[in-house]
Image (spheres, rainbow, N blue to C red):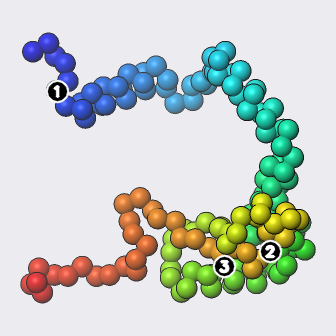
Amino acid sequence: MTGMPHTVEEQRRIGRASYARLYPPGFKRRRNAAQTALQRIAQRRYQLQPEVVNSRRLQRQVRHYISGKGKAGAAMIGCSQEDLRAHLDSTLNGASVLQWKLAYRRPPSSFVPCEAGYHYTNMYAKPVALQGSSLCPLQQALSPTAL
């Protein structure tokens, strides 16, 4: 044999090791000219869509309001921070989950005044599936003698 890796796992391990040698932690990666041009086009396209910019701003206000960092979204959301957290907890139907993300029953962009889509009645908490675990309640494993 010529010393070539035999399995896909070995090839991936060697590839990861060579990548780590080329780009150690903290290495600043730079874009090439084609990537920079594509980034400029994408940024310009984003700047020319005011509804996208407005939507991002409103989403940021909602997240800050939920986390307690900001008060700007109070009138738009329509309830206090405590009431909003209670409402989101009630949408989980009593399930205890480690993580959830904010979701909307209808997309906020479908509302004529975009702010109306961020009212608390349009929001719910969606459980996030964690890799390697389930969202089911923890159960004690059956002992081999019980089988």
Q: CA distance from mark 2 to mark 3?
A: 12 Å
Residue in front for this viewpoint, 41 or 75: 41
> Does residue 135 appear anywhere in the picture?
yes
Disc 3 or 1, which lies upstream in sequence? 1
**Pointer 1 residue:** 6
Mark 3 packing: few (<14 Cα in 10 Å), some, or many (20+)? many
**Quick one: SS at disc 3?**
helix
**Pointer 3 residue:** 88
Residue at image coords 49%, 26%: 24
Marks 2, 3: nearer the viewer: 2
**Pointer 2 residue:** 119
> Does residue 64 appear anywhere in the picture?
no
Disc 2 or 1, which lies upstream in sequence? 1
Mark 2 packing: few (<14 Cα in 10 Å), some, or many (20+)? some
Where is residue 102? Give x, y as percent. 65, 67
Quadrant assignment, res 64: bottom right
**Quick one: SS at disc 2?**
loop
